[in-house]
Amino acid sequence: MPGETLTRRTLFRSAGVGAVAAALPGAARGYLNSDVWPRLQWPAPTSVADLPAPDPIVHLVNRITFGLLPSDLERARALGFDGFIAEQLQPEAIDDSETEAAVAKAFPTLAMSPDALLKLDKGNVARELKGAAIFRAVTSLRQLFEMMVDFWTNHFNIYQTEGLIYFLKTVDDRDVVRRYAFGRFRDILGASAKSPAMLLYLNNAENKKSGPNENYGREVMELHTIGVDAGYTQQDVQEVAKAFTGWTINKATGTFFFSAVNHDNGARTVLGQSIPAGLGQGHGERVLDILAGHPATAKHIATKLCVRFVSDTPPASVVNAAAATFTSSGGDIRETMRTILLSSEFGAAADQKFRRPLEHVAAALRTLDAVVTPDGVKPLLGALKLLGQVPFDWHPPNGYPDANGAWANTNGMLNGWNFGLTVGGNHLTGVQADLNALTGGLKNPTANSLTDALSKRLLARDLTSADRDRVVQYVAAGRPPTALIPAAKVKGSIAGAISVLLDSPYFQWR
Amino acid sequence: MTPFTRRNFLRSVGLGSLTLPAWFPRLAFAASPSAQRDVLVCIFMRGGADGLNVVVPVGDDDYYKNRPTLKIPQPSGAAGSAIDLDGFFALHPALAPFKELWDDHVLAAVHATGSPDGTHSHFDAMDFMERGTPGSKSIPTGWIGRHLGSVDTGNKSPFRAVGMGTLVQASLRGPVTATALKSIADFHLGGKGSQPAEIARFQASLSSLYADNAWLDLQAQQTVEAINTLAAANPGAYQPQNGAKYPDTDFGSALTQVAQLVRADLGLEVACVDLGGWDTHASQGGASGKQASLLAELAAGLAAFHADLADRMNRIIVVTMSEFGRRLLENASGGTDHGHGNCMFVLGGGVNGGKVYADWPGLAPDQLASPGDLAITTDYRTVLAEIVDRRLGNPKLADVFPGFTPPAYLGLVRAA
């Protein structure tokens, strides 16, 4: 397996769908200073990127994929704004068998049953899951689906490293997060509540009538459903904890198990609603019904999705619209996403999100149309460790922060720049890009022509003239910008220009 | 291909061998900020540390009644028994390295302290504590950030405020940009096979692309300055002194690097270091186990830091905190749920150490905070205010802790 190339799938042929350029209403960004949704862990900047706006399709592909893979950009241009959204919202109709076959071959533990996983020595189980997350982010055709997987991975965060969780997060990823990423919220919530990795991570596996453990009871409300400001009390936390007593796992099989003997079968009151005694496992199910159907959950999930896909400070209008769809559709995640992506607020939100490390790394590889092999997993994980976002490696239950202010710091800048230097020079083990091809067959390049060709290809938008001059000056390396680059220097000039463009402000935003 | 090293880089861009670009280091640190004020090292124990099993109230019977399996035995000299401090309080045995610091009067503890807001949410409690405005999120900055913004030390170093790790701690948010630092050794630009002169050109190019004062440019400029400052200082491989042995963990590595920054005189005024893993709902352990391992790491790290910087400790103050303590009554999974009051440690040459500062509220049912937690009798801001005023030389407490007027100081530290 090492060294074997996972080929990028053949591109979609444009399917004859008219390339209708979507008209985007409401392009003004004025909302940033008004009517914003409250409760931010990181203060938002009053203005973020100050760059020439990308065209709407570039904004769309930047935002709902892990970066500007040329074939995805082409596909989006062919389908149009709404068409590409519609296609990406229907991942089951996208044939991604090539990615999945490669994943199955390179990361065989992903398909294993819980009991088979538990029989393994520690081995590579965690690394395979991390590797698959990176590989799918870079390669999958179901890009929005993979972004949703990333969203729910963080929403229902599980730190992968400890004890049996090391093995069972693989099951959670497959049977909870990936299975329901576009499903109904009650279904993903219910699956998560019974997921052995979650039961262990938030200690519900040890939640017994004789002395309830409040960890899951609290976080299922604060983080997974109604949110911290929904007005629940410590009494509610304790009632929810009691409702979930006895929800545990069979440690031999690694599967959910309801232990009636450890369950407090009494009547409960949760958020003012009565749950009768004697329901057994049904107590927990009723709590999940109450939480999933609570208006605060609609608002909480809608807010988080808008923060993920619109901006750190999404306007209340789009949050309210998403919450309304969430409620009216019975918690349909796909329909909620459709409301967000087709909103004018989404259309007007180009460059509002600083790329988090996984997005940064994946976007660089996709932009370069690089081929990633299993050998690439180790160095890519190394880069993500320096940047601070190894998949499944966030310890507390709230998931990696989703705020520009969290990630835009000296450590992130430095290590992001170094990643650009490394991939620009094609120096990352297990990752190969055809750098010459990126110039589009440019002959006899000058600093001017090389800068123009590569900035168009990698950033898909115009640089300001001042920024263009700066890149040209770097590429020219003391020669006149119009002078032919000496043949011996072309390769290095291409690498340098790629690195400086990937490290420029333009590439930091999505 | 010559591997790129900081030394090569220094040779190529530093000290006059090239025409220095305008952004080259503002090495104009205050002559020595440490001459007027302590360096503050703020340790955040994330997850809600069980303070009742850190500085243990061995003189309170209710402690033993409520901790049937997690209790720390009375001090007896036996292995695993608590280490007596004053007859009422005792240290968890895993904190043994603290005993010498205690006896040397450089380490003090405060008990029944914390943030007065009653939340049991980790994330709200951390947020409130780091903002320094319990119960309110209207002010977006952190207490350390506001301290730095309200005292002009003339120090322009990019290492004036450092958050160890990949994310900057919320307490550092404010008008002075803090540097997020994971690894000094890796804090330089360089791809595989890059030549130093090329890297210098590359860096100059990035500097020009991030020179427009857009929001992100501030971070980029800070990054370049930090790179340059480290290159010029060339701190090299760091050798801890006095036989100090830091734990081989992220926490140990962070403390080592804080010491390295102090030694290199790079203008460090505040550093934030996190130690996570304290959310011990299950299998917390007593004298040994999960929490004991974390305490051992904490104690080994701070003892090493103190030994390493022995000659500097008169100008260093370390303070520990955690978002809340844990429930008095243990649960049935060998753990404790989220609580309220907690303990803090303060370490440094200016500390009136060897004493537990506590107005002990008691642990009887009617003395507990709802739903069964240690009550808070000392606002954590009272502790910090005394440090800010007396050791950091900043009397502008209304800026640092808006809306809060500390009662009389505890006498925890001496005026600098």
Image (cartoon, helix red, strand yellow):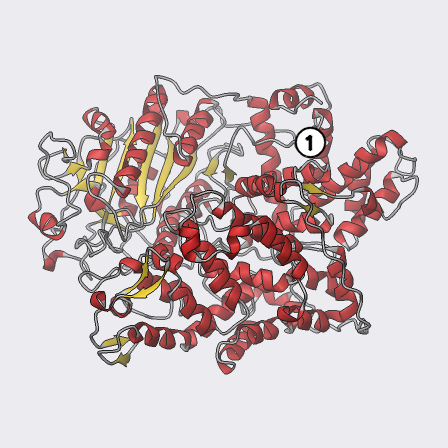
Q: Measured from the top left, where is residue B413 in percent x and y?
A: 26, 33
Residue B219 versus residue A313 in the image, above or below: above
- Does residue B175 show up? yes
Tell me where residue A291 sits by quadrant.
bottom left
Q: Which residue is mark 1?
A: B22
How far from the left and from the top, in percent, is residue B186? 56, 31
Q: How many marks on residues?
A: 1
Q: Nearer the viewer, residue A293 or B289?
A: B289
> In front here: B254 or A492?
A492
Compared across the picture, whether A414 is left or right of A119 comes to right
At label 1, which amino acid type do we have?
Answer: Ala
Q: Is residue A356 visible?
A: no
Position above or below: A286 against B54: below
Report whether A380 appears left or right of A187. right
Q: Is residue A423 above or below residue B255?
A: below
Q: Residue at x 23, y 53 (%)?
A: B336
Question: Left or right of A59: which side holds B383?
Answer: left
The one of B35 and A377 positioned closer to us in this rendering: A377
**Nearer to me, A206 or B50:** A206
x, y percent for residue A493: 81, 35
Q: Which residue is the extreme one toward the top?
A: B242
Q: Secondary structure at mark 1?
A: loop
Instruction: Describe residue B333's horizontal placement relative to residue B137 as left or right.
Output: left
